[in-house]
Amino acid sequence: MKTNTKLAVAFLAAASSIAASAADAPAPAVTFDGYAVVTGSTVNTTPSTSSMDLSAAKFGATGKFGKVTGYASLYYDGTKTDLLDAYASLDAGNGVSITVGKFLSYMGYEAFDVPNMAQISYAQAIATIPAYHTGIKLDYAAATYSTGVAVVDSLFGPSLYKGDGDLKKPGLEAYYSYKGIKDTTIWFGAADEVSTKTAFYDLWVSYALNKTDTLGAEVVKVESADVYWLVAYTKGLTDKWSLTSRISGDDSKVTGASNTKYTLSPSYTINDHFIARAEVSYVPSHGATKSSTYLAGQTIFKF
């Protein structure tokens, strides 16, 4: 039996198991979540560019059907709307869960959803971390560690919001996270894009100095290509104010370019539903590339 046939059979078997569990469940409990983000920014290059608009919006619905949880969401990225999440998860007991559908990659220290970020921009200007794809994953969570493995249509698709839809050349992901050291999370993930035989490695560590202050570091390695890294420190100034300081960079074996980015980003939590955030980031000149400064302000409504 060919690999893609085996994958399709496994995908259908998992879906059938989830559907059977849902059929025997009581009436679902449905909840909703989402956010809307307005961002104004200026990039001081030659020529400089400025913008202010609704930059992101998300609306999601969760339905609980006994041991099965389904989640779906729509996402607007400032130009178009996409189906983002669309999956069902079966709680198989003893810390094991099986998920089938369209879901976010395991990879990456910095969050995808804007309210969960500590600053406005990402550490790198280009999309280095896989985002959404479709497939099946198996996860296990214990008291001090968690682990998971996923078989998906691709690591990187035509956009951040979906894979390539081709299970004949799937993407593979796996991770291990350890929390057995007080206030520390050590996370390691590995992935492979089968069609291009490109391995991807992601290691990040987070340490909570106290209830409000966090120090994090990440190194991402794309085999035979690039290395990306970041170090970030979030300091709670008051019960409302926080400040994130970050230094990040990339080194490309392909182009030989090396860039460093410096970021400061204060945030003000107005209440449980509103956050105001600002950022200044600076990238020094390198070779023929001139330096640039990014200034931005952002308001976030979430529910």
Image (cartoon, rainbow, N blue to C red):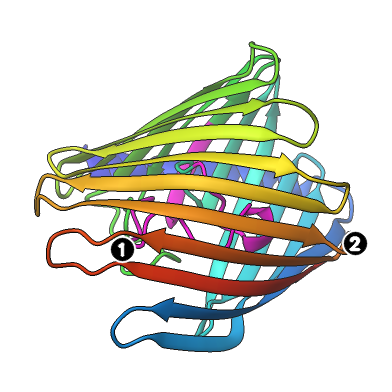
**Residue occupying image coordinates x 80% and y 49%:** 65
Q: Is residue 53 above or below residue 226?
A: below
**Residue occupying image coordinates x 86% and y 65%:** 273
**Quick check: 124 left or right of 180?**
left
Q: Identify which residue, 239 or 106, lies in the foreground.
A: 239
**Quick check: 113 left or right of 209?**
left
Q: Is residue 276 above or below residue 223?
A: below
Q: Identify which residue, 10 or 96, lies in the foreground.
A: 96
Residue 185: in magenta span: no
Alpha carbons under labels 2 and 1: distance apart:
40 Å
Note whether residue 299 is visible. yes
Q: Which amino acid, by three-letter code, is at mark 2?
A: Asn
Q: Position of residue 68 (x, y in %)?
A: 73, 44
**Residue occupying image coordinates x 39% and y 78%:** 44
Q: Which amino acid, by three-letter code, is at mark 1?
A: Asp
> What are the residue bounds of the magenta stretch?
109-138
Note whether residue 102 is visible. no
Residue 133: in magenta span: yes
Task: State the residue position of label 1.
Answer: 164
Query: Which of the numbered marks, if any, corresponds to residue 271?
Result: 2
Q: Secondary structure at mark 1?
A: loop
Query: Which quadrant would the N terminus be assigned to in this image?
Result: top left
**Residue occupying image coordinates x 63% and y 74%:** 297
Dominant secondary structure of the magenta stretch? loop
